[in-house]
Image (cartoon, rainbow, N blue to C red):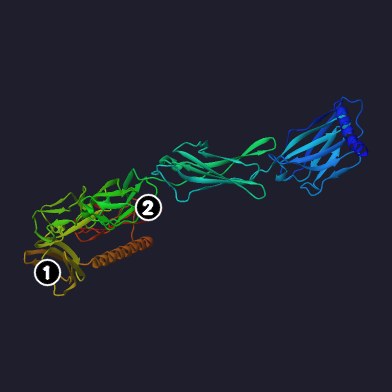
Amino acid sequence: MAFLRGAFLPLFLHIFLLNRSVWGKVELTMNDNLEVYLGDPAEIPCHYSFTGVNEEPSFVIIQWFVRSAGNGSRMRIFYSDVNQQIVDNNTDYSGRIEVTSDQRGNTLLIQNVQLSDEKEFFCQVNGQEAGNAERKTHLRVFAPPEAPEIEGVPNGISVTNTMPSKVASCEVRNGFPKPNITWYKDSEPLVPKVGQVNVIILVTREFRGFYSVQSTLEYRTLKEDKDSHFSCEVSFSVPGAIRTRMSQSINVTVHYPTTMMELWKDSPQGLVKEGDTVELRCQGDGNPPPIYIFSKEQEPDAPLESRGDVLILPSVTRKDSGIYQCRVLDSAGQTEVKEEVTLTVHYLDPAVVVPKDLEYMDKGENLVASCNALSSLKTVTIWYKEGKQVGYGNTLHLNDATYETSGQYVCEVTVPSLPSLHTNGSVHIIVQGGPQLAGVEDEIQLEEVAGRTLNLSCEARGHPLPSITWSITGSQNWQEVMSKANDHMTHSMVSVKINSDVSAVCNASNNQGTEVKVFSIKAIEGSGVIIVVIILCLLLLAFLGSVVYFLHKKGKIPCGRSGKQEITKEKPTKDDIVVEMKNNPKNEEAVLLKAVNGEKKGPNDQ
């Protein structure tokens, strides 16, 4: 009986409690989800109330359980009643959780939330006869990933590939939950497409619970993609939102064959002349730049040595003129692309002058000289003599030659369209003939004071160079004081003592003839004697005037107011000196002393 009583009592209590529970009800309120950042604290509220009872139960049990998502078993981490609060030991939350209570319920506080805390947390309330209830909150933990890193393929991509090729890879590390990666080309998203775009995703779960995602983009590139920029964008969840972060953009190297080429003369600028160094440059639109092969159309099987895309032709001649070609082969070696340019090397041969070097002309003769230089361009010819222009054109006309015609004639040949191209030639003209004396007179009349020395000069031109001799009569006292000659003229000077009339003959002669010039010098008296006679006469007249004035003052010579007195009654002769006096009340003086060359009337006859 004792056994039956002991077994029946718990059963009775259980039935009694069950019957009482239907009388009360617990209203329990919890959030379905709670989102927090990694490392932040999490507060999970559990609000409850009792309905259907007259009063609040005096004994309430509250327990918290945790269960991993998708796992059927759960584990208690907290227990409390009116008498005690217990945090279960040996769990991941021992020492990390705290439960606070208020009139509305209690709140579970989890410090330093970890990735492993992303679980379901159950709050169970048991009010005994007032009823019991249980609800859960799913705690979600978020960790933003690092910035995405993008890397393009180092060797480039060929457009000849028929299937998508790897373009770049993008990796994002240490995110939770798993981040997503989207690819962009020129800011436009790339959507996977068979034969065009393919994306390969590799997800890695780290031992700490973080996710790392690596995405590889495979893309069938075209030539137009050489300027395109690729980038990747990572999208990740945070509490209450979704955020994105863009990587830097990259430009991948696209390999494509050459389809167009250009060949041009890079230097020198303008026209090319013999002796220049010519550079021909070849450029195609292929990538990478192909190997260029240079050749001359006239010699297609003889490749020319070049430096990359430049062909250098040093010191070119007219033989280097022609059509030059540049060609490349595509990567398959099948399609040949080429371009060509015409090179013209201009030239100017040395000037040929006819007659050349040295030419003799007779005096009075005519000559036509020519100057020609073979050139690939139009030329201009100008003739010079002693630096002065004397002719224009290929021919020079020398008419009625004189000794002034002799000299060096230089023809300058230039190319107006290429000034650096020029040449010249020359001819030396010598006019031969008999002597020609300087001056236009054959005989020169001179006068010189007797006793003086006179220098006589004689210049003669001619070819061969004439010699000069002197023949002097009327003076034995003479000598040649200067004799010189150059290519064009002979010059001689003699010094002659003039004592009497002299005749000097300059004789210039060569094998072509003779020419003379005569100097006739008349000896004249010197002007010194005349000056002395004039001075003596003036002194004599002054003396006579003084004597007459003295005698008048002494009264030896009576003079009336008539003003004129006859001094002598004799008839004056031709060589006599007549003195005419005037009587002046203020001043009496002689006014005229005159030498008479013919007969004169006396003073009384006037």
Marking on residue 584: 2
Q: Residue furthest right?
A: 2
Q: Is residue 145 left or right of residue 306?
A: right
Q: Is residue 544 left or right of residue 448?
A: right
Viewer-proximal residue, 444 or 21?
Answer: 21
Q: Are marks 2 and 1 in contact (CB under 8 Å)?
A: no
Say if residue 67 shows up in the picture: yes
Q: Secondary structure at mark 1?
A: strand
Residue at image location 6% in from the left, 64% down from the top: 512
**Residue type at numbered disc 2:** Asn
Residue 347 coordinates in the image, percent (x, y): 22, 53
Nearer to us of marks 2 and 1 is 1
Viewer-proximal residue, 520 or 371?
Answer: 371
Q: Secondary structure at mark 2?
A: loop
Residue 52 coordinates in the image, percent (x, y): 87, 24
Q: Quadrant of the N terminus?
A: top right
Q: Is residue 25 above or below residue 505?
A: above
- The quarter holding residue 20 reads top right
Which class describes the residues within 10 Å of circle 2: few (<14), some (14-19), or many (20+)? few
Q: Choose the circle earlier in sequence order: 2 or 1.
A: 1
Query: Which residue is the site of mark 1?
Result: 467
- The quarter holding residue 423 reads bottom left
Viewer-proximal residue, 532 or 546?
Answer: 532
- The quarter holding residue 32 reads top right
The CA distance from mark 2 to mark 1 is 78 Å
Residue 465 coordinates in the image, percent (x, y): 12, 66
Residue 594 coordinates in the image, percent (x, y): 26, 58
